[in-house]
Amino acid sequence: MSKFFALIPAAGSGSRMGDELPKQYLPLDNKPMIYYALKILCKTPQISRVFVVLAPYDNYWTQYDWSEFSEKLVVLNCGGATRAESVVNGLAASQHECTVDPNDWILVHDAARPCLSLSQLEKLINALENDEVGGLLAIPVADTLKRSDTEARVQHTESRENLWQAQTPQMFRYDLLARALENTTKITDDASAIEALGYQPKLVHSDATNFKVTYPEDLALAELILKERKL
Ligand code: CTP
Ligand code: MG
């Protein structure tokens, strides 16, 4: 039986957020943002370990108490210059921490998606656990899409047919993901590396609450969703 692991890349600086505190530590309902990704992944019974990839110079992590996650949490101080590098380094380092079979699953999930729900996560695992390739949570594009020039003038309208917005977690087998990421540059998600090898990751229908907190105005919405869940 394949095991399930999770990896949270959390070595970014949050440049679009524009705060001195890296985005993953910004407070949401009195907890640092990354707390929520950790909580949901650690409480999912199928997942046996949760790896967090921090920047080597991270001075923030140790300022919080993470003891409630001690059963599954493994901290790796090996983040890289890009998200993809952080994932590659994390995959390599995680294999020194525990026994991993090449066929085991790894779910890569952004620290910046604090609103992932248990039902979205379970849907992903159930949809993919017998899949050859693996896949990701995603939502069909709902808005009309405009392609612009550099002056923000519309050049043309793009068709949104069969277009999806990729989210995380993205779930692939350890060996396939490690091989895929070896050969890629300039990717913004793990699935693109798998696609570059000629595979077709499965899109598992999610919803908009699992959005990526990117800009300052996203914080209030994330907090609202998290508070609503607690009620
Ligand atoms: N990430 C990482 N290592 C990097 C860059 C990003 O581990 N060198 C992580 C982020 O911490 C985040 C996830 O990848 O959890 C998604 O990245 P993103 O939302 O783009 O976060 P940042 O890169 O921090 O933000 P920005 O792009 O605005 O700088
Ligand atoms: Mg980024």
Image: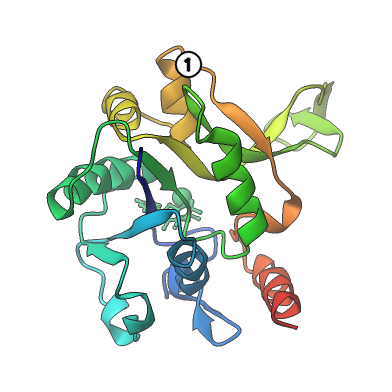
Coloured how? rainbow
| Left or right: residue 130 compared with residue 70 | right
Residue at (44%, 54%) from the top-left corner? 46
Residue at (43%, 46%) from the top-left corner? 108
Residue at (28%, 25%) from the top-left corner? 179
| Left or right: residue 156 compared with residue 21 | right
Few, some or many residues within 10 Å of mark 1 (<14, 14–19, 20+): some
Quickly name the residue at label 1.
Answer: 199
Query: Element under label 1?
Result: loop
Residue 175 in view, yes or no: yes
Counting from the top left corner in percent of width and height, residue 183 is at: 29, 22
- Pick whichever, 210 or 129, lies toward us: 129
Counting from the top left corner in percent of width and height, residue 196 is at: 43, 17
- Pick whichever, 30 or 137, lies toward us: 137
- Pick whichever, 134 or 152, lies toward us: 134
The image quadrant of residue 116 is: bottom right
Counting from the top left corner in percent of width and height, residue 197 is at: 40, 15
Q: Is residue 116 above or below residue 202?
A: below
| Left or right: residue 169 compared with residue 145 | left
Indicate the quadrant containing the C terminus: top left, top right, bottom left or bottom right: bottom right
